[in-house]
Image (cartoon, helix red, strand yellow):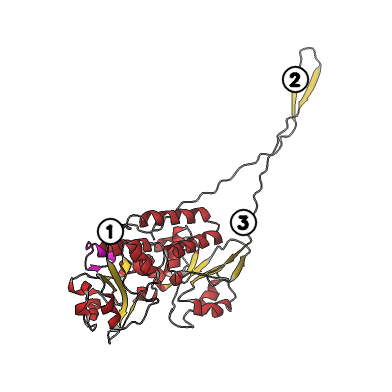
């Protein structure tokens, strides 16, 4: 059920960096040349050569002062060399910026994502997995973070904002990104650019954002369809779904369609709302179990048989990496738009899992 915690979408473009150095040659020492004539007299001639040395100095990028997504002002005296990432959406961005080898601590959902993508080898050998409960006011392991002594902790200002005060008490620098508060792709891109500023990687950040925009242009042809994305269904048929002010609604728009849910937030919504919305397509998360389980849960929602998507067999389930692409507000979200486009044009399989995702967008969809 890891992706359910992060209602959160990368290809990660890793740009190799090189450091250019220069060698400065010091001034030459006086050179003495002695010549002996046949007339038994000696003449000594001294030649002195002079070398001009040019030294170029570059102003230091640090210290810098930045504001995070909670409008908190943070000053960084130097470049953060060690990082703790507390959200998979943030971890995706760090890899895109070539910073994976600085991640000394990461949440279990980030680690699971990297395992599925075969990218755990980019982490330092001593990187620690920090178990968190994103729905709890004290859901992080503060002791584990303190022991790691990171230069910076990066957190999600949506789900993890409740931790802000407690995180500050750890005595470490904490920066909150938009994360699950994102409502548009621009919000996601702003997070990429914010990390670019923090780590003096603005050029790489612009490259990542440009890649995202190029990918999104592939899927924006209008399809004249509405969709609903349901995260969870309760036993009474009420449900949690992406409202019209969420980044998942932005994915539907980028796919050429529209969100059928006319309300904001994530719910819970009553079954009657789904009936009234009458979407052309329903996409479900696997509810932490599997495709069959999610489809069965939907079939028990009162009034579902009258909904167009259900009647016409246009119900789809995402799990694994496919769910991560839809639910994580990050680079993989460009594939969230692709998934909705395929569903709304009838080109998606009913059950989309990690293997299907890699066959469509792999073998290295984020790096």
Drawn side of residue 72 relative to residue 16, left or right: right
Q: Residue at x 23, y 84 (%)?
A: 302
Residue 28, horizontal then vertical, whole percent = 71, 34
The CA distance from mark 1 to mark 2 is 80 Å
Q: Residue at label 3? A: 61
**Would you call the spot at circle 3 few (<14 residues within 10 Å), some (14-19), or many (20 or more)?**
few
Q: What's drawn in magenta, residue-wise?
A: 343-354
Residue at label 1? Answer: 360
Q: Label 1, secondary structure: give it.
A: helix
Quadrant where the C terminus sits is bottom left
Q: Quadrant of residue 175?
A: bottom right
The reply to whether callout 1 and callout 2 are in contact (CB within 8 Å) is no
Query: Mark 1 against mark 2, which lies toward the viewer?
Result: 1
Q: Position of residue 311 (x, y in %)?
A: 18, 74
Secondary structure state at the residue bearing disc 2:
strand
Q: Which residue is mark 2?
A: 35
The foreground one among 64 and 148 is 64
Q: Nearer the viewer, residue 360 or 295?
A: 295
Question: Foreground residue, 166 or 239?
Answer: 239
On screen, residue 39 versus residue 279, left or right, reads right
Marks 3 and 1 close (CB-CB < 8 Å): no
Image location of residue 238, percent across then percent down: 30, 84
Quarter of the figure that contains the N terminus: bottom left
Q: Position of residue 113 (x, y in %)?
A: 37, 67
Q: Residue at x 31, y 64 (%)?
A: 257
Q: Secondary structure at mark 3?
A: loop
Image quadrant where residue 209 sits: bottom left
| Residue under the point 60% across and 75% down | 171
Which label lies toward us, 3 or 2? Answer: 3
């Amino acid at each position: 059920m890891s992706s359910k915690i992060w209602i959160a979408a990368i290809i990660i473009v890793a740009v190799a960096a090189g450091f250019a150095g220069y060698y400065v040659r010091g001034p030459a020492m006086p050179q003495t040349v002695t010549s002996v004539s046949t007339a038994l007299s000696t003449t000594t001639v001294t030649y002195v050569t002079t070398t001009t040395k040019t030294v170029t100095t570059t102003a230091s990028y640090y210290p810098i002062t930045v504001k995070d997504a909670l409008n908190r002002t943070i000053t960084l005296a130097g470049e953060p060399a060690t990082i703790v990432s507390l959200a998979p959406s943030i971890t995706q961005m760090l890899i895109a910026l070539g910073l994976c080898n600085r991640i000394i601590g990461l949440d279990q959902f980030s680690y699971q994502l990297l395992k599925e993508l075969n990218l755990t080898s980019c982490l330092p050998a001593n990187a620690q997995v920090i178990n968190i409960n994103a729905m709890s006011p004290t859901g992080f392991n503060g002791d584990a973070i303190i022991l790691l002594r990171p230069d910076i902790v990066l957190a999600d200002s949506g789900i993890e904002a409740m931790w802000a005060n407690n995180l500050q008490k750890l005595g470490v620098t904490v920066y909150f990104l938009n994360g699950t508060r994102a409502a548009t792709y621009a919000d996601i891109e702003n997070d990429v650019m914010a990390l670019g500023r923090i780590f003096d990687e603005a050029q790489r950040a612009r490259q990542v954002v440009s890649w995202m925009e190029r990918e999104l242009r592939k899927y924006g042809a209008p399809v004249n369809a509405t969709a609903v994305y349901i995260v969870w269904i309760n036993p009474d048929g009420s449900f949690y779904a992406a409202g019209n002010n969420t980044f998942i609604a932005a994915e539907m728009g980028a796919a050429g369609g529209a969100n059928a849910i006319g309300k904001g937030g994530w719910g819970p919504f009553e079954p009657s709302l789904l009936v009234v919305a009458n979407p052309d397509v329903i996409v479900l998360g696997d509810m932490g179990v599997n495709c069959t389980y999610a489809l069965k849960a939907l079939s028990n929602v009162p009034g579902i048989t009258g909904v167009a998507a259900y009647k016409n067999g246009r119900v789809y389930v995402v799990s694994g990496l496919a769910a991560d692409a839809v639910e994580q507000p990050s680079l993989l979200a460009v594939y969230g738009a692709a998934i909705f486009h395929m569903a709304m044009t009838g080109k998606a399989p009913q059950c989309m899992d990690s293997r299907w995702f890699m066959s469509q967008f792999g073998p290295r969809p984020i790096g």
